[in-house]
Amino acid sequence: MKLSIRKSIATAAAAALVASIALVSVPAANAAAPTCTTTAGVETCKGTLANGASYQFRMPANFKGTMFFWEHGFKPTYPGVSAVPTGIEEMTPASANTKSDITKQMLLAGYGLAAYDGTVKGMRGWNNTFRIEMLKEVIDTALAKYPKIQKKVVYGSSQAGSILTPFVEKYPTYADSVGIMAGINPSPADALQSACDIFYILSVFADPTIKGCAAFGTKGVPGHMASVGELLKVVALLTAWSKNLGAPGLEYPAALKGSGIPQRSALLLTGLLTGVPTKSAHMDGISTNAVVAEHSINATVAILENLGEAVATGTLAAQSASEITGPGFYDNTKTNWASLLDDGDAGRYNLGLSGDDGIAAMLGVLSAAPRVTGNADAIAKFKALDKSTFASTKPTILISNEADRLVFAGNSSRYVDKKRAVYDAALAKWEASKSGPKPIWNTLALYAMTPETYTKFTAAGLPDLAGPVAASGVGHQSFTTKQMKAWVDMLGVAARSGKVPTSKYVEYIATKVPYLNGDLDYRPADLKYNFG
């Protein structure tokens, strides 16, 4: 049986071996005045911030008073794994699946638009602290240029989740509503820990030479290349599994060689222990046929398809964060692997995990394997990355895909949990004194769901991983045009009213927007870690 994993990962990984790595030149220190032109009723202004990073405004003739300020996600500093940006690549929310944005729709609706390139002296990566100040400068510049701005929406995707939250806490008057799309939850340590676990688990079951996050922490090009070297080892595994679906028996560790447990059982376990979705762009985790004879095999192929992006971007993000923390931020000496396997998953995917005996055997060797001991100072810095109080009362609306293969949907529910804890404490304090205005709950989490079934099979009975992706709910920063437009319209309403939409309003919108979940009680799978 032969399947192809995500082509871009394999291609980029190969390119990393021969890429010419060079630091980006340091931009000019003085901000330039914007240059503006008007076409078809839209004024476009381009300029640079004090550190040389570019920004852009688009102001429609039918402007209705609300300006949206876009914060893009993670971008690499060095070439080799993914393309290095050369300026502003996104003005508005865009779908990675369809390569389409909603710039036209937002301008027609009378929204002003702003975006900038979050580059700091040629460096990108985990530069969140700098980008908080850069966003403030963008807003200050827009307000000076357009005094007619009445309401400000700060919104963004992915890495932006850990930028916008501390931003609005530091500068509460700079936003009237906050939008987080497929955003990572501050601190990113909870999510990055699981990304590092992927490396470690694969080192136990498939390639003992993998060091993973234990090899991260060196600054600059040497650190980048060291992390790429670890990524290439995982790409080699994914490539092999894409050709045989992990059917051969385990070769590692020695205690499991000859046990009859197939490699795909370890692959499935890796995904379940780290929270990788069991639905992917092409695999619904349910559909079966003569070749994919059981739903847990479908889910295993989904994890295989998802791992490419999860590990590739996770590698770049973890290495970038490690340049802040220093080496040794990853530690698993206290990890209880058995506790990371949900009881429901152990039952649901029992056959794919080689039964109770297979589960016990694999968890047993994981528990007995040598652990990674980190550096206490680096670990403390790691857990404190982008630390937030979650005390902002600005209306905040999150949107996530049910099966986001990179920033898992559990980031949204974790965000809500943290905001709820602060709200509950404030409400209890108010009820004890009845002093001042009563706190209101002002956070809303939306989810885009997948169709129930969508896996397609080739004439040979193999999953068709080259065909169209699911209509909704899969991929990272990949939403339908209707879903994205509904989200920004809700943000606009919230900016004007000071409140998130009611449950009845969300239920109504969900009837008009396919696959948008109108059930506000829906909760995705939780993240595996909570460092508090």
Image (tube, rainbow, N blue to C red):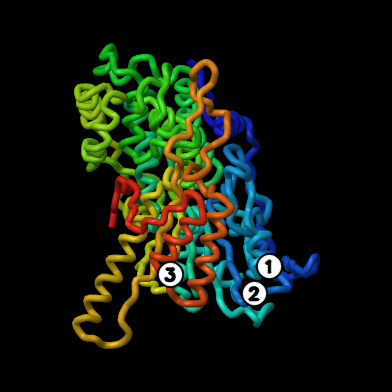
Camera-near label (2 vs 3) is 3
- Asked whether, in this view, residue 225 is left or right of residue 531, the answer is right
Whether residues under marks 3 and 1 lie with C-beta atoms below 8 angstroms apart, the answer is: no
Report helix, strand or loop for mark 2: helix
Residue 449 to residue 35: above or below: above
Residue 99 to residue 161: above or below: above
- Residue type indicated by callout 1: Phe
Whichever of callouts 1 and 2 sits on the residue coming sooner in the sequence is: 1
Compare residues 388 and 158 and report the one nearer the observer.
158
> What residue did someone put label 1 on?
57
**Residue 47, x across and y down, in percent:** 71, 67
User: What is the distance, in whole Å, between disc 1 and disc 2 at their CAs?
Assistant: 8 Å
User: What is the distance, in whole Å, between disc 3 and disc 1 at their CAs?
Assistant: 26 Å
Report helix, strand or loop for mark 3: loop
Local packing at callout 2 (Cα closer than 10 Å; few below 14, some 14-19, many 20+) is: many
Local packing at callout 3 (Cα closer than 10 Å; few below 14, some 14-19, many 20+) is: many
> What residue did someone put label 2 on?
142
**Residue beneath the point at 32% across and 27% down:** 204
> What residue did someone put label 3 on?
500
Residue 212 to residue 512: above or below: above
Residue 416 to residue 342: above or below: below
Compare residues 195 and 441 and report the one nearer the observer.
441
User: What is the distance, in whole Å, between disc 2 and disc 3 at their CAs?
Assistant: 25 Å
Report helix, strand or loop for mark 1: strand
- Residue type indicated by callout 3: Val
Number of numbered discs present? 3
Res 218 seen here: no
